[in-house]
Image (cartoon, rainbow, N blue to C red):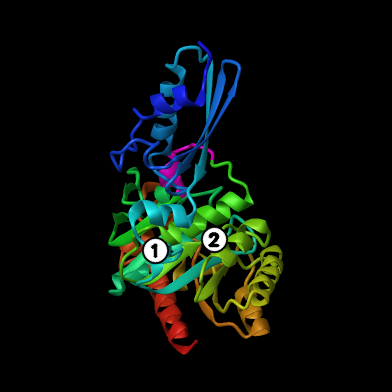
Amino acid sequence: MSLSKENILDALQEVKDPELGKNLVDLGMIKDIEISGTAVRVTVALTMAGCPLKNQIKTDVESAVRNVEGVTHAEVILGTMTSEERARLFGREPDEMEGVKDVRHIIAVASGKGGVGKTTVAVNLAVALQKKGFRTGILDADMHGPDIPVMLGLTDRPVGNRGMLLPLEKYGLKIMSAGSLAGEGVPIVWRGPLVHKAIKEFLGRVAWGNLDYLIVDLPPGTGDAPLTVANAIPLDGVVIVTTPQKVALSDVRRNVGLFKSKRITVLGIVENMSFLRIPGAEDHQIMNIFGSGGGEKIAKAFKIPLLGKIPLDPAIREGGDCGTPITLKEDSEPGRVFAEIAENLVDQISRS
C-alpha cells in the first residue's frame, strides 16, 4: 500500500483538540503533510504559541500517524495560527491585545544584568500592590529563566478556554509564566521570533480581565531578549533594579539608555541588596557589602526617582525558595520597604 496525504488525513480525523472537542482536520489545524517513502511529517497550527495542551496534541498526532499502515517514522512540527485564522475559528475579529484591553497600567521590571534580584523585586512589588487593594497580575516574560512559579509556589498548569489562556491565581495575583506551561526543569529553547510571538500572546491571548497593574518581569540585560519583549509590550513605564556595586551600575546606564531610545518612561530605580543589618549589633548597625550610594548616583545622574533600597536579608531568599514572598509578612523590614516602593511607584505613575 502506497502512502498518500488522504491516508494521513483520514487518520487525523480521529485526533481531537482536547479543549475544543473537534478533530484537528475540521478545525483547520493541519497545515502540511510531507511524505518521503515510509516517513511522514505533519505540521500542526496551534491556536496559540503557549498552548498548554501542545504536548498532548503532538503525542496524539504522532500516534495516529504511526498507526497508518506503511508508516515507519512520524514527525510533528508545531506552529501557530495567524490572528485571522484564529478569528475565523472562534468567530470574532482579530485583536492582538484583547487580553489586556481592561488593564490600566503595564509596568516592566528590568535589570542591566542577571543576579541582581530582578524577579524577586517583581514578585514582591506585585504582592505589595495587591495588598494595597490594587487588582494586580504578573507576567513572567523572562522566557529562558522563568522563576516566578518557584517564587510563588505554583505547581498547576494554565488551562485554555476558546483560544484564551486562563491565568493561574495565588495570593490574590493573576499569574502567567512559560515555566508553568513547560513544567519544572524543562528547558525552553526559543529563539527571538518565537519569544516575541509568545510574549504578545501572553498579553493578548491570556484572559487577564480587569486589572489596575500588570507587572512584567523582563529578561535581564540589554540584548535581543529584553529588546524583543520591550517592543512587543505596550508599556506605561519600567522600573530598573540594580545593586550598589560599580559593575551593576555600569549596566544600569546601558539599561536606561535602551529604554530611553525606545521612548519608554523609566519610572524609577530600585537598589536591591543595599545593606546588611548586622544581627545583634547595637544602634542598628549595617554593613555595606556591595558598596553604598550607587542607586542615588544613578538616580541623580538621569533625574530618575530612587523608589527604594532593599536590605540584604536571608528572609527574602527564604521566602522566594518556599513560594511565600517576604512582602506577605507585614512585620518584616523588607516587607515594609517593598510596601514603600509600591507606594512610590503608584505616586510616580500618577505624575507621569
Q: Residue 106's spot in the image, x, y percent?
A: 45, 71
Q: Is residue 132 above or below residue 231?
A: below
* Within-10-Å neighbours for mark 1: few <14, some 14–19, many 20+: few
Alpha-carbon span between mark 1 and mark 2: 29 Å
Q: Secondary structure at mark 1?
A: loop
Q: Mark on residue 80?
A: none
Bounds of the magenta span?
178-187
* Res. 19 in view: yes
Q: Residue 41's spot in the image, x, y percent?
A: 55, 27
Answer with left or right where residue 94 lies relative to residue 298: left
Tag 1: amino acid: Glu
Q: Is residue 66 above or below residue 141?
A: above
Of labels 1 and 2, earlier in sequence is: 1
Magenta-colored stretch includes residue 252: no
Question: Which residue does the image show at 45% across and 69% down from the upper left?
Answer: 282
Q: Is residue 208 above or below residue 106?
A: above
Residue highlighted by disc 2: 218
Q: Residue 147's spot in the image, x, y percent?
A: 47, 50
Contact, CB < 8 Å: mark 1 with mark 2? no
Q: Mark on residue 93?
A: 1
Question: Which residue does the image show at 59% across and 64% down from the upper left?
Answer: 111
For marks 1 and 2, give the one nearer the viewer. 1
